[in-house]
Image (tube, grey):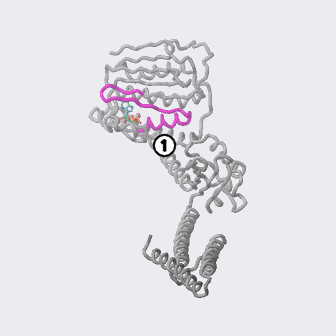
């Protein structure tokens, strides 16, 4: 017990004793000590009862307790209650200030933030940007169902998918279709989810401008390159033998530039595409073509084998898939020294999908380079890539084509032992092969072309 509380307590006890002794003495004087003592004791109890009632009433009515002067227990109780109330008031004030600061910060965010109750998919709270970007209005839309309020955004389907939902999607704003939004669903508790929508229209415009710029430059370079190429072809090295090596180098470089421009145009075209028109891709003839291309590039320097154990076809664009596969086969030939082997295999995968893999026994790729290998112009060895006629765009093209087919590229490589590039397609891309594999016996049976 703190000293001032103890003092108040002793003082009250002293007062009580004083009253009782005084009443006993007065009783003795008048010759009636006990009745007077009883009356005094009752008076003291009544007074304390009255004080207790007063405190209880004030607390029940949530009245502010004012500290009273005096140093009895009731004054001490008032002082203690006043201090507790002041502390609670201060805490509440700080909490309200903090809440105000948080909600002002959330309101000032340029991104739309919506708190959603997961169970009943209702809007619990949203900031000002949600009105501008998503069209939510205060107070009408508090407690409204997100599904119908945010149509045509696929928020309901997204919420239903739970924690396995795609983390981010792009969509047009329901308020202004010219606004592109990047939407993110963040589960921050079991009941509450946060929907964050960011306006990415400007970024998309810049991305479009960049894409258009690259496509336009490539397109503009095509004509002068064709002219240069044409003139170089007209020059006969036999007429000026001393110019022959220079002419040969000029032809090589102009071919490289043409290939670079063609690859840039392909990449721009793929980037501008949202998807592909699905057709049945005849994998037996695809494998025959790939083998022929590998043989032509290899010039009998490698042992080439083709194996088709899948017995199914793919759904997608034959032209694009051929471009992707042939890039991988080209790389395998170019990055495998003479005497090495290249195996092309088409097989079913465990998930019901299918997988085309190109395995080589070539130089391999150091693990540190693998995460960036599909970036444009990223090369492990620039000199080796140039020597072999590479543009540095092949794997970027492969990645884009596979993305358009919701497929993924997996790379397994070991320096000095070789690499395996696998294109994994989901079950939805698999199509039963009901044709008779007539023209392609070589693709359906494992075959090999002997090395040199
Ligand atoms: P490039 O035109 O230079 O071959 P790519 O995008 O096709 O460009 O490949 C990027 C880089 O990845 C290449 O420069 C090469 O270093 C490496 N690479 C690709 N395929 C293979 C492979 N089969 N074996 C070893 N390295 C490879």
| Rendered residue at 40%/14% (across/down) | 449
Residue nearest the observer in this picture, 229 or 442: 442
Camera-side residue of 421 and 324: 421
Is residue 29 rendered to the left or right of residue 289? right
**Between 436 and 196, the one nearer to me in the picture:** 196
Is 18 within the magenta?
A: no
In the depicted view, which residue is nearer to us: 324 or 54? 54
Q: Which residues are magenta?
A: 392-420
Q: Position of residue 203 (x, y in %)?
A: 53, 54
In the rendered image, the residue lying farthest to the left is 242
Rendered-image quadrant of the N terminus: bottom left
- For residue 17, side relative to residue 57 (left or right): left
Which residue is located at x 54 percent, y 41 percent?
A: 269
Identify the image quadrant of residue 159. Answer: top right
Q: Which residue is mark 1?
A: 223
Q: Name the element at disc 1.
A: helix
Seen as rendered, the residue at the extreme front is: 31
**How crowded is the residue under tag 1: few (<14 C-alpha within 10 Å), some, or many (20+)?**
few
Q: Quadrant of the C terminus?
A: top left
Q: Is mark 1 within 8 Å of ligand 1?
A: no
Vertical order, 320 against 32 (above or below): above
């Amino acid at each position: 017990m703190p000293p001032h509380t103890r003092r108040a307590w002793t003082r009250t006890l002293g007062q009580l004793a004083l009253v009782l002794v005084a009443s006993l003495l007065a009783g003795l004087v008048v010759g009636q000590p006990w009745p007077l003592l009883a009356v005094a004791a009752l008076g003291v109890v009544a007074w304390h009862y009255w004080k207790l009632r007063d405190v209880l009433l004030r607390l029940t009515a949530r009245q502010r307790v004012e500290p009273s002067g005096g140093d009895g227990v009731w004054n001490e109780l008032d002082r203690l209650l006043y201090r507790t109330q002041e502390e609670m008031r201060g805490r509440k004030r700080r909490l309200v200030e903090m809440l105000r600061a948080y909600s002002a910060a959330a309101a000032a965010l340029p991104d739309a933030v919506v708190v959603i109750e997961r169970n009943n998919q209702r809007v619990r709270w949203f900031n000002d940007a949600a009105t501008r970007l998503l069209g939510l209005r205060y107070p009408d839309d508090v407690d409204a169902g997100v599904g119908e309020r945010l149509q045509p955004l696929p928020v309901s389907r997204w919420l239903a998918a739970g924690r396995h939902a795609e983390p981010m999607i792009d969509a047009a704003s329901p308020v202004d279709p010219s606004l592109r939004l990047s939407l993110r669903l963040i589960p921050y508790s079991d009941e509450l989810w946060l929907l964050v929508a960011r306006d990415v229209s400007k970024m998309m415009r810049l991305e479009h401008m960049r894409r258009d710029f690259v496509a336009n430059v490539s397109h503009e370079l095509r004509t002068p390159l064709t002219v240069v190429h044409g003139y170089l072809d007209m020059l006969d090295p036999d007429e000026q033998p001393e110019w022959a090596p220079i002419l040969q180098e000029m032809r090589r470089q102009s071919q490289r530039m043409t290939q670079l421009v063609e690859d840039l145009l392909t990449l721009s075209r793929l980037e501008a595409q949202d998807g592909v028109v699905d057709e049945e891709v005849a994998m037996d003839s695809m494998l025959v073509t790939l083998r022929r291309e590998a043989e032509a590039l290899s010039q009998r320097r490698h042992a080439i084998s083709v194996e088709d154990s899948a017995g199914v076809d793919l759904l997608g664009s034959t032209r694009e898939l051929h471009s992707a596969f042939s890039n991988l086969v080209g790389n395998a030939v170019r990055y495998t020294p003479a005497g090495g082997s290249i195996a092309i295999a088409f097989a079913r995968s465990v998930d019901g999908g299918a997988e085309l893999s190109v395995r080589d026994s070539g130089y391999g790729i150091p693990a540190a380079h693998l995460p960036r290998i599909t970036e444009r112009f990223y090369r492990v060895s620039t000199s080796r890539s140039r020597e072999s006629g590479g543009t540095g765009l092949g794997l970027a093209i492969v990645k884009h084509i596979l993305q358009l087919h919701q497929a993924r590229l997996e790379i397994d490589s070991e320096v000095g032992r070789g690499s395996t590039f696998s294109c994994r397609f989901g079950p939805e891309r698999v199509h039963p092969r009901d044709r008779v594999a007539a023209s392609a016996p070589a693709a359906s049976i494992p075959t090999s072309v002997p090395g040199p």
